[in-house]
Image (cartoon, grey):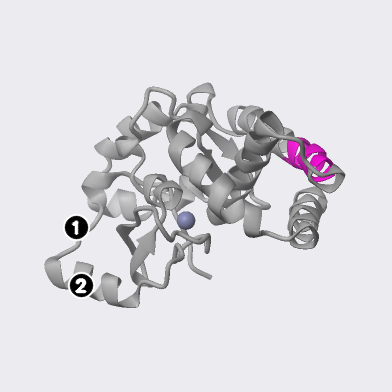
Amino acid sequence: MMKLALGISIHNKLAAEEDVAMLKESYHERCDCCGIPTKGVNVNPLWIEDFGWKNACDLCFLTANLDQIPSIDKGVFIFCPKLTQQEVNVLCRLSWAVSFHLEKSKVEIEVREAADTLSIIMSRLTKGASDARSYFTPAINDVDSNVAYMNLMKDEEYAQRGLIYEHLRWMPDEEVFRESTRWYATEVFNQISIHHLQSQVDMFMNRISKG
Ligand SMILES: [Zn+2]
């Protein structure tokens, strides 16, 4: 399975002209990492070790370029071995979209139920922040501290960063993604059937409840 690892830009490959052209060619209006539709929003070239160049949505791109988060609200690192980073990204987007609709309009009872389950899942993820502190150090939650740490790594140490970050995930801050959340909530979320929403939310709930 393709692994989206936490990272920073100075260690990342830069896309050459031919890489960008190839990505344009292979672009099928979805993020190659998390699978969300991206029609109408920007995607960025992202090099994934062993998998090559990918078209990445803003959330997946910033996961690997944490030093480029365009805000002082950078989110937190959490301990979350049960979900991949891509799944955390999808969950965040789903939960933000549901909140967007709950704020703006009347929603169906099923969406409200999904919202309740999503908020339980998100609070479990948030608890992963204190788990990370107890397994590592209090500074582990802080994105800037980790960026500074990765900055000091030599290339070979950076390549081995999975030894530390294997079970840590970035939980992004919603503020940074206001615009793409609005787009996702109105253009993508509205196309998702209630049935699909429920089964997706149940799947995530099962995954984080297991063992
Ligand atoms: Zn993505």
Q: Name the residue type under label 1.
A: Leu
Q: Secondary structure at mark 1?
A: loop
Quadrant in the rendering for residue 192 = bottom right
Task: Count the labels in the image.
Answer: 2
Kindly report the distance in space between the C-alpha atoms of the residues bearing marks 1 and 2: 13 Å
Q: Does the beta carbon of the residue at mark 1 sit less than 8 Å from ligand 1?
A: no
Side of 208 relative to 187 (left or right)? right
Q: Is residue 194 magenta?
A: no
At which x and y percent is residue 13?
22, 58
Magenta stretch: dominant secondary structure: helix
157 to the left or right of 173? left
* Residue at 45% over, 62% down: 31
Sequence-first tag of 1 and 2:
1
Q: Position of residue 87 (x, y in %)?
A: 60, 54
Disc 1 crowd, CA 10 A, few/some/many (<14, 14-19, 20+): few
Range of residues picked out in magenta: 112-121
**Residue 89 can be seen, yes or no:** no
**Is 8 on the left or on the right of 171, as rendered?**
left
In the image, residue 111 above or below residue 86? above
Callout 2 crowding tier (Cα within 10 Å): few <14, some 14–19, many ≥20: few
Q: Position of residue 119 (x, y in %)?
A: 75, 35
Which residue is the site of mark 1?
14
Rendered position, 121 above or below 11: above
- Residue at (33, 55) in percent of width and height: 159
**Eyeballing the image, is 40 above or below 77?**
below
Identify the residue shown where x is 64% and y is 59%.
191
The disc placed on residue 21 is 2
